[in-house]
Amino acid sequence: MPAATVFACVLGNALEFYDFTTYTFFALAIGRSFFPAHDPVVSLLISVATFGVGFCTRPLGGLVIGAFADHAGRKPAMMLTIGLMAVGMLMLALTPPFAVIGYAAPVIVVAARLLQGFALGGEVGPATSYLIEVAPDDRRARLASWQIASQGCALLAAGLVGFILAHSLSSEAMTEWGWRVALLLGLIIIPGGLYIRKNLPESADVSDRARRQSAASVLGNLLRGHPWPLLLGLIAIMTSTVSTYVGLYMTTYGETALKLKAPSAITAPLISGLTTIIFALIGGWLADRYGRRVVMLAPRILLVLAIYPAFVFLIGHPSIVTLLITTGLMSALGSLSSAGVIVAIPEMLPASVRASGLSTAYAFAVTVFGGTTQFVLAWLIGVSGDPLAPAWYMVGSGIIGVIAMALMPETKGRPLPRD
């Protein structure tokens, strides 16, 4: 498969994580620009809450765009999501500050986040379905694993951009326009992605079925005919999401719980990004060679067993080195497992509900657990006073995920289900 095709399919997922990481880095500056308040903490909280609003429309996007992809085809759905993402990012990057247009600024920003959330909810299902449908049977996992690896690429890019801007600009320049530069840099690759997606051939798996079912009937068929794969997929993605977002939380954890300096803690996403790229691609290769189940289960079980001792060691020996080791451990094992999950779920579903099934499971899991993980962790640490709270949270979600993964069938070597 041409590299350009893979790039076009994983572009949206990469943009999601670039956007998330960039917003996290510059939440304080964005808050001061759009949500001025007498108390800077209030401004920051409003900014973070506004970012979280985008998660609210993800389930709707997963349902609507996923059904659209199973009705009209993967290609038009992928064109729609990347276009909506571009509009949302432009709205956020180009909206004048509160000081210029008043309350219209936060209104536009909230609208941009809602639009982005809707698009992101429907991105992964059609794009991943397309990848595995056009891939050779013995390379489906390797190609699908680029969806996970793209998250690492985005973390690296956002981390490098954030690091360069933070060390190049004054705090005043960062608040006024520096964060806008970071967002606009993420938009550079969208025109190329749009062009490639426009010229992709439609997947043969959906061309006939698309003419015979309406978008509304897709969801009915999914919920009535395939509730078990949908539930197992949602739980498996939930577990992967928790470990991913705990990893993204490690910068904040290093600064607050471990009292590390911000310039040191900000390197955690760079390590997370690098290990995600490497181990996601290794996981895809292993899943094609040895099967989906062993790749999903073995790293996840190991992570459940290792994460508590890792946090105990980190808290007992707080330093940037131990922070990076712990972050790398989570990213490596989580990415290995996720590489099996991302291909196993759509392989359980027939073409008529494949995109909607993966989109729905992914959108709901990320909304409930991705959108709340960092808040829940901060709350748990604050209420309990226990810096080990992130480890317990990962252990609990990991055990539930292992059970779901153990119930999923082995799909390696099987042709994709037909209708």
Image (spheres, rainbow, N blue to C red):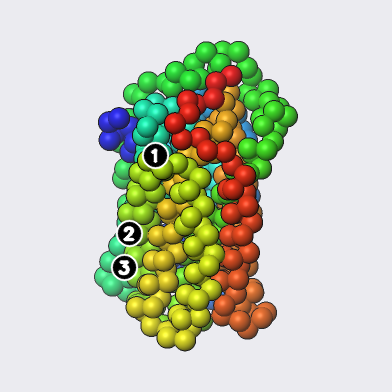
Label number found at residue 288: 1
Mark 2: few/some/many CA within 10 Å (<14, 14-19, 20+): many
Q: Is residue 414 above or below residue 123?
A: above
Real-space Cα separation, disc 3 to disc 2, in angstroms = 15 Å
- Which residue is disc 3 drawn over? 163
Sequence-first tag of 3 and 2 = 3
Residue contact between numbered discs 2 and 1, judged by CB atoms under 8 Å: no
Real-space Cα separation, disc 2 to disc 1, in angstroms = 22 Å
Mark 1: few/some/many CA within 10 Å (<14, 14-19, 20+): many
Sequence-first tag of 1 and 3 = 3
* Secondary structure of residue under mark 3: helix
Q: Please provide percent x and percent y for residue 279.
A: 36, 54
Residue at (52% x, 38% y) in the render: 410
- Which residue is disc 2 drawn over? 274
Name the one closer to the observer, 347 or 260: 347
Report how many numbered discs are placed on residues in the image: 3
Q: Quadrant of residue 214?
A: top right
Sequence-first tag of 2 and 1 = 2
Label number found at residue 402: none
Residue at (41% x, 43% y) in the render: 290
Q: Left or right? Give the position of 8 relative to 206.
A: left
Residue at (51% x, 20% y) in the render: 206
Which amino acid type is shown beneath numbered disc 1?
A: Asp
Q: Quadrant of the N terminus?
A: top left
Residue contact between numbered discs 1 and 3, judged by CB atoms under 8 Å: no
Q: Quadrant of the C terminus?
A: top right
Q: Nearer the viewer, mark 3 or mark 2?
A: 2
Q: Left or right? Give the position of 283 relative to 28.
A: left
Name the one closer to the observer, 300 or 324: 300
Which amino acid type is shown beneath numbered disc 3?
A: Phe
* Secondary structure of residue under mark 1: helix
